[in-house]
Amino acid sequence: MAVASARTAELSHAERIRSVAAAAGSLGLTTAGASYDLIAMHVVDSGRFTLRVPDDTPLAAEVVCAPRGALGALVEFTDIAPVRARDRVRARVTLSGRLTQSGRRDGNVLVLGLDPARAAIHWQGRVEHVDLDEVFRTEPDALAVHEAAMLGHLDDDHRDVVTRLARLAAPEVRRGVVAVRPYAMDRYGFTLRYEYARGHRDARLLFPCPVRDATEVGVQVEALLAQSRRCRGEYRF
């Protein structure tokens, strides 16, 4: 039974950008004066990108001293597969615009907002520029903030399930495989990474029905396992 399906089920570029930003614990920020690695300081919500920065940091000083209070900035998110796999970088997201003070403080924290001018995503070897209005009116994927924990649990504790799911790929995908990893997951299904002695290949494995939240994943995985049991032959790697 092949993974391929006539049903197209992929996140839009705008959904993918929002999902990467929602799940990311850190980001890179570049200004004309410096580069920063910021951990657990951002929120993307209701069409707004917000940073919470201690007011005694160089970044806060840059914003305060910027002409007209607006600091040109490039924000970069890197989406990394949460499992051991070759080429773990799945996507890179960039937002460019100007950082400004939001007009409020939270104790010794300066609250900054990004007024974006451009959004882009580097995914599957291509750079796609995405309309900002589309990005900020789109919600993240239903599994975005749960994906890392769920895939890590599947890869660490349920290798038998991964093996059984891997049977659903076409024979030419399975031939010569030495390892399979659950590389990505969204509301439509899994992406499995098939690794060979040289190189790798990804296969999309769709849920019978898209999920609305993380509580529905188990039912869909069981349905896929039922399909796998109907596959003839035994598959080992």
Image (spheres, rainbow, N blue to C red):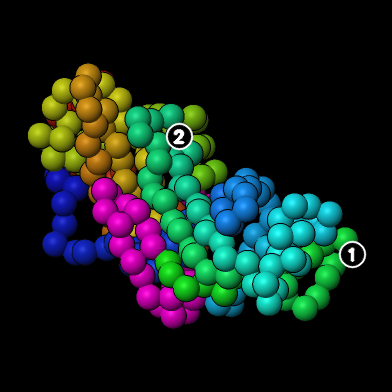
Indicate yes or no whether the magenta region holds residue 21.
no
Residue name at image x 35 percent, y 30 percent: 86
Q: In this view, does 48 lie above or below 65?
A: below
Q: What residue type is labelled 1?
A: Gly
**Closer to the camera in the image, 98 or 17:** 98
User: Can residue 5 be seen by looking at this rendering?
Assistant: yes
Does the CB distance between marks 2 and 1 fall below 8 Å?
A: no
User: Would residue 46 be found to the left or right of residue 122 on screen?
Assistant: right
- Which quadrant of the structure image shows residue 203? top left
Residue type at mark 2: give it. Answer: Val
Element on which disc 2 rests = loop
**Residue 161 visible in this rendered orientation of the protein:** no
- The residue labelled by disc 1 is 107
> Which residue bears the numbered disc 2?
83
User: Which residue is painted at 34% across and 59% down in the image?
Assistant: 188
For the view shown, which residue lies furthest in the front direction?
A: 67
Name the quadrant of the N terminus. Answer: top left
The span picked out in magenta is 120-147
Q: Distance between the residues labelled 2 and 1?
A: 38 Å
Query: Mark 2, residues whose alpha carbon is within 10 Å: few (<14), some, or many (≥20)?
Result: some
